[in-house]
Image (cartoon, rainbow, N blue to C red):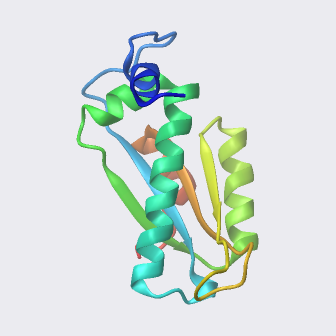
Amino acid sequence: MGFRRFLHRITAPKFERFVAKDQSLKMVFIINHELKMGKGKIAAQVGHAAVKATLKSGEIRPELLDAWLSTGQKKICVKADDALHIEQIEKQAKQLKILTSKIHDAGHTQIPAGSLTVLALGPDEDEKLDGLTGDLKLL
């Protein structure tokens, strides 16, 4: 797919559902704290998650992506205890119809290949995400 087609796909107005432009939206990135990744590694993994979540939102919920892009693209990073904790959160998120994007490491640097590093949630409404991740500590 060409870049222009991709850009059109995520920006063209084709919204089935309306999201108010003044609605407070965010993405939440849940970091696997058990892996003890360095700051740079965490930044890279969150970057991967942000791109994946943005692309997925553009395909599945473009009205949320549009509203999130026009309201400052708020992002929050929090810590989960381990991969099992992240999997539990993902299961709850899917039940609430929150978009999820998991990142597994390739294993080229600090951690073993296939390790679950980050779960991205959203973009979605602040209240919806807070109900799921509000008890997690900020990174």
State left or right for residue 87 relative to residue 26. Answer: right
Q: Residue at x 44, y 43 (%)?
A: 127
Q: Is residue 42 left or right of residue 72?
A: right
Q: Quadrant of residue 24?
A: top left
Q: Residue furthest front?
A: 2
Q: Quadrant of the N terminus?
A: top right
Please tell me whether residue 54 is drawn above or below residue 114 in the rendered image: above
Task: Please state the horizontal and vertical placement of residue 57, each as a whole percent of the image.
Answer: 52, 34
Residue 122 visible, this orientation: no
Considering only vertical position in the picture, is 30 above or below 58? below
Which of the image's four quarters has the C terminus?
A: bottom left
* Residue 83 seen in render: yes
Residue sitting at x 39%, y 14%? 12
34 sits to left or right of 43: right
Quadrant in the rendering for residue 59: top right
| Residue 136 in the image, given as x and y percentages of width and height | 51, 69
Residue at (57%, 82%) from the top-left corner?
Answer: 33
The image position of residue 11, as x and y in percent, is 37, 22
Q: Is residue 55 left or right of residue 95?
A: left
Rendered location of residue 54, percent (x, y): 46, 41
Q: How many marks?
A: 0
Q: Camera-side residue: 22 or 71?
A: 71
Occupied quadrant, residue 39: bottom left
